[in-house]
Image: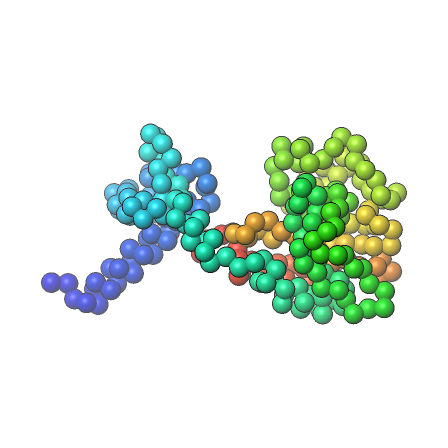
């Protein structure tokens, strides 16, 4: 007979292998074959098949059709929905810390009706400060740093639907479509965007995108231009805030 300690270790191993399978499937929403999963996580196909079928019985995986592939099952989505917190509740303390560190206003944004919507804000304690109302301001995406990082996370087809051929201009610094599309390629590589007085004269914005299981968001710092003496301290602070938020609600599994 197996000893209790051996049973315990065997159970832990099965759970670890099941977690590896779910992580593998999480990065490919369209699904993977058993052979692909086995190769990726370095396990025998027969072992993967046995665990995947056990997960399927619980709704944690599901078949994608006659080809034999599998993907994440509906039970995972239900579990996530049950444990989800409002994004604002999760990030508000970190937004406050970012604002305190930089002594500037900070906003949490998302895409709302193909524009930038403000979900949360922290207003800087400064005589001259930028204040956006929450929930009722919608800004064209191409005019702000937050909008640019969100656009950079979309497919070319999705960008095409959002961006008109002739982009509205708010200031002389607002970009035309060709220039913007080139900039978005750079933003996708470096991970942050800057609005150099493109939305409003006298205001510069810096933003990073958040990739979370609650969706894609942007955190932006909005600064009167006369207080900007270089980009790096704003960019570094934003990436630090992004890392802290994504440790809590990363889109990655594990």
Q: Is residue 92 left or right of residue 231?
A: left
Q: Is residue 253 left or right of residue 204?
A: left
Q: Is residue 32 left or right of residue 54?
A: right
Return the x and y of residue 11 as percentages of the image width and height. Answer: 26, 59
- Res 204 → quadrant: bottom right
Return the x and y of residue 184 as percentages of the image width and height. Answer: 70, 41
Rendered residue at 52%/55% (across/down): 250
Return the x and y of residue 198 as percentages of the image width and height. Answer: 82, 46
Q: Is residue 25 visible?
A: yes
Q: Is residue 50 left or right of residue 59?
A: left
Q: Nearer the viewer, residue 136 or 75?
A: 136
Q: Nearer the viewer, residue 184 or 108?
A: 108
Return the x and y of residue 28 as percentages of the image width and height. Answer: 45, 41
Q: Is residue 145 visible?
A: no
Residue furthest left in the image: 1
- Res 234 → quadrant: bottom right
Rendered residue at 41%/38% (across/down): 31
Q: Quadrant of the C terminus?
A: bottom left
Rendered residue at 84%/50% (across/down): 200
Coloured how? rainbow
Rendered residue at 62%/51% (across/down): 217
Q: Nearer the viewer, residue 146 or 110?
A: 110
Residue 59 vs 98, above or below: the answer is above
Residue 5 vs 230, above or below: the answer is below
């Amino acid at each position: 007979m197996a000893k209790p300690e051996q049973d315990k270790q065997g159970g832990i191993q099965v759970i670890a292998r099941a977690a590896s399978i779910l992580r593998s499937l999480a990065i490919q929403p369209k699904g993977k074959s058993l052979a692909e999963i086995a190769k990726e996580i370095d396990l025998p196909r027969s072992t993967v098949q046995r665990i995947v079928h056990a997960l399927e019985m619980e709704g944690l995986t599901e078949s994608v059709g006659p080809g034999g592939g599998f993907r994440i099952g509906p039970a995972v989505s239900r579990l996530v929905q049950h444990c989800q917190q409002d994004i604002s509740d999760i990030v508000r303390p970190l937004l406050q810390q970012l604002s305190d560190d930089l002594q500037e206003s900070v906003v949490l944004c998302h895409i709302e009706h193909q524009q930038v919507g403000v979900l949360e804000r922290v207003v800087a304690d400064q005589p001259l400060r930028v204040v956006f109302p929450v929930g009722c301001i919608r800004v064209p995406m191409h005019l702000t740093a937050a909008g640019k990082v969100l656009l950079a996370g979309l497919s070319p087809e999705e960008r095409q639907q959002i961006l008109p051929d002739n982009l509205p201009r708010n200031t002389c610094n607002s970009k035309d479509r060709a220039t913007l599309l080139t900039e978005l390629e750079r933003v996708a590589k470096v991970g942050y965007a800057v609005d150099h007085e493109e939305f409003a004269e006298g205001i510069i914005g810096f933003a990073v995108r958040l990739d979370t299981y609650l969706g894609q968001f942007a955190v932006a710092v909005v600064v009167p231009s006369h207080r900007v003496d270089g980009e790096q301290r704003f960019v570094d602070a934003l990436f630090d805030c992004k890392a802290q938020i994504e440790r809590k609600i990363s889109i990655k599994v594990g």
